Image (cartoon, helix red, strand yellow):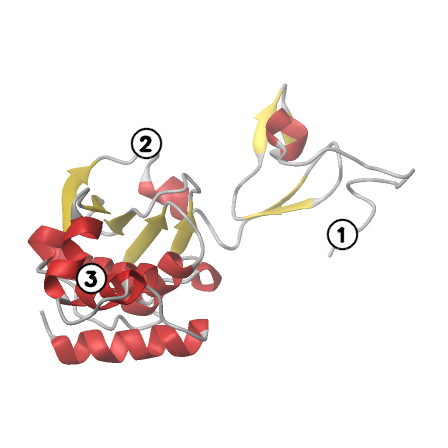
């Protein structure tokens, strides 16, 4: 592990997030490990779509992963599947191989062993996670994605219009129901209910 690279990435994560916390350290180091496992050099160029990362929670951890890998929501190379877990899957898109990485169950308890000079528990996590060997900090396994990686990445130029709400659908995310093109909300997969207060509801505006 390059401690110089780790320090640079942690500084960048702290700059973007306005502070540094233990979960960012986990995210940065997880991204570094994934790059080693997949044979990728860090930092990745922003235009390189080779790596797709799926994180299983949002917040500080996700920012650390993004800084280390160069994968961002805005570049469509980072997906958040919110299981509330400090875990991530790293996909080599051309090779269609995937590795899921999680912290070892004992990592939190053992972090202080690598920062014996620090009494504060939170600070010990912050420093210890940066010093622990990869094989004591993380566990990983090769996995098979439930969806084809090409379906996950999808087509950024695809557009459709929902036959029910008339809102535009990007990236090939429409579904077919009884021969009609519908968005996932109108297909019964909505995360919201509405409209409220007499509003016109979905389809009243098309950005």
Position of residue 138 in the picture relative to residue 23 (left or right) = left
Left-right relation of 196 to 91: right
Residue at numbered disc 3: 129
SS under mark 2: loop
| Crowd around label 2: few <14 · some 14–19 · many ≥20 (10 Å) | few
Q: Secondary structure at mark 3?
A: helix
- Residue 133 position in % (x across, y down): 8, 60
x, y percent for residue 139: 14, 45
- Vertical relation: 64 (above or below) 141: below
First reached walking from the N terminus: tag 1 or tag 2: 2
Residue 40 visible in the shown view: yes
For image coordinates 60% across by 34% down, the residue present is: 184
Q: Are marks 1 and 3 in contact (CB under 8 Å)?
A: no
Q: Which corner quadrant holds the C terminus?
A: bottom right
Question: Which disc is residue 206 wearing?
Answer: 1
Q: Residue lying farthest top?
A: 178
> Quarter-wise, where is residue 180 in the image?
top right
119 left or right of 15 in image:
left
């Amino acid at each position: 592990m390059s401690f110089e690279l780790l320090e640079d990435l942690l500084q960048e994560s702290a700059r973007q997030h306005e502070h540094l916390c233990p979960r960012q350290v986990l995210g940065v180091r997880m991204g570094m490990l994934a790059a080693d496992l997949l044979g990728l050099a860090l930092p990745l160029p922003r235009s390189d779509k080779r790596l797709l990362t799926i994180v299983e929670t949002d917040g500080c951890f996700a920012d650390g992963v993004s800084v280390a890998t160069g994968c961002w929501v805005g570049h469509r190379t980072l997906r958040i599947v919110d299981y509330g877990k400090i875990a991530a899957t790293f996909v080599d898109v051309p090779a269609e191989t995937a590795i899921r990485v999680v912290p070892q169950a004992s990592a939190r308890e053992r972090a202080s062993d690598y920062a014996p000079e620090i009494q504060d528990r939170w600070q010990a996590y912050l420093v210890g996670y940066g010093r622990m060997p990869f094989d004591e900090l993380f566990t990983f396994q090769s996995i098979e994605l439930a969806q084809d990686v090409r379906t996950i990445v999808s087509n950024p130029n695809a557009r459709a219009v929902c036959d029910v709400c008339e809102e535009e659908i990007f990236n090939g995310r429409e579904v077919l129901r009884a021969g009609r093109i519908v968005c996932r909300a109108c297909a019964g997969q909505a995360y919201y209910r509405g409209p409220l207060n007499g509003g016109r509801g979905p389809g009243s505006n098309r950005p």
